Image: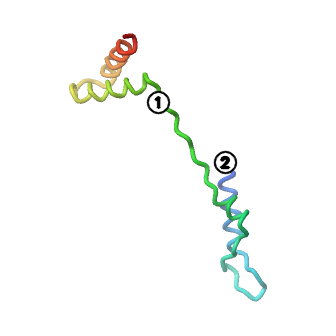
Amino acid sequence: MACDNCSRMERLLYDAMRGLSLAGSERLGAPVSLSEPVADIIAVKAVKSTRKASKYGRAFGRNIKALRIKHPRTQPSTLLKRAHRMTKKEMKS
C-alpha cells in the first residue's frame, strides 16, 4: 500500500513523462506512451481493506437503529448507553 507522498510523487512523475516529447521535432506537451511495466506501476492504486465487523458491533448497530426509530427525540448519548446495555445482555445469553 503506497503512502500519500508516494502516490503524489507517482502522479507527478506520470504527468512529467506525459509532457515530454518523443523526438526533438515534436512539440512539447504531446502524450508519451509508457512501457507496460511503468504504466502498470503508476496505474496501481492501493485498495484499502475494510475490517470485518465483530459480533458485538453488528448487534450494537441493530440495537441502536431500533432505538433511534422507537425514540427519535431521546438524546443520542442516552440511546447509546441503552443500546450498549441491551447488547451486553444479548451477548451474555
Along the line of sight, the residue nearer the viewer: 53 or 6: 53
| Picture layout, residue 79 above or below residue 34 | above
The residue that mark 2 highlights is: 2
Along the line of sight, the residue nearer the viewer: 64 or 28: 64
Q: Amino acid at mark 1?
A: Ala
User: Horizontal and vertical percent for residue 28?
Assistant: 70, 81
Most extreme residue toward the right is: 24
The residue that mark 1 highlights is: 53
User: Horizontal and vertical percent for residue 39?
Assistant: 68, 64
| Picture layout, residue 32 above or below residue 70 | below
- Which quadrant is home to the C terminus? top left
Kindly identify the residue that appears in the image at 39 percent across and 15 percent down.
91
Most extreme residue toward the front is: 93
Left or right: 52 with respect to 58? right
| Picture layout, residue 23 above or below residue 14 | below
Which quarter of the figure has residue 65?
top left
Kindly identify the residue that appears in the image at 67 percent across and 50 percent down.
5
Which quarter of the figure has residue 82?
top left
